[in-house]
Image: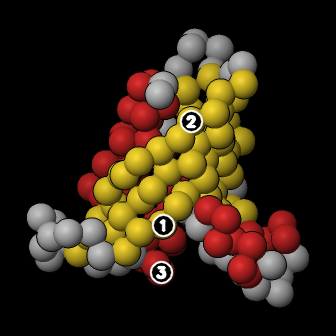
Amino acid sequence: MNTSITHVLHRLHEAVNSGDYDALANCYGNGAKVVATPMSGAPKNNVVQHDCVSALQSFQQKFMPEHLVTTGDEIIVEAGDVALVIAKLYLVPKASPNALPCEGKRALYVMQRQPNGEWRCVIDNFFGTDLLDFA
């Protein structure tokens, strides 16, 4: 497991949960894409939003307004400066953050090593392969 990539994912989810949009923006690379909503029947290019922070704010308001994200198991497949991450994410009610996770998702991320050696997310797909159900 690549602990640098794991650390970026944890920072990303902590930033989403706390509403720290500056920290959130620092988790993404230049030109990063976020799959904010699966738009069934829409042209495929409409699935992706370019402004990661706005996309995640919209996503959070629509799909998880009363939940926090916690990270579960993950698999990281690295090839040079690119890594595919398949991660289990769980939603926990904000009202009872110590409760057992209520809903699990398998998210997909593409990470890219930056010239300074740090990893950044360049594709963030919370829907994972479930996105195919909307095609």
Q: Which mark is residue 76?
A: 2
| Mark 3 to mark 2 CA distance (whole Å) | 28 Å
* Between discs 3 and 2, the one toward the N terminus: 3
CA–CA distance between discs 1 and 2?
Answer: 16 Å
Q: Residue at x 36, y 64 (%)?
A: 90
Residue 94 % position (x, y): 20, 72
Whether 60 is drawn above or below 121: the answer is below
The amino acid on which the numbered mark 3 sits, given as a three-letter code, is Lys
Above or below, 116 against 84 in this view is above
Residue 59 seen in render: yes
The answer to whether 18 appears left or right of 32 in the picture is left
Instruction: Please name the amino acid that badge 2 sits on.
Output: Ile
Q: Which residue is mark 1?
A: 105
Label 3 with label 2: CB-CB less than 8 Å = no
- Residue on which the image places disc 3: 62
Camera-nearest label, 3 or 2: 2
Q: Residue at x 47, y 80 (%)?
A: 62
* Apparent side of residue 43 relative to residue 100 in the rendered image (left or right): right
Left or right, residue 76 beside residue 23: right
Q: Earlier in the sequence, mark 1 or mark 3?
A: 3
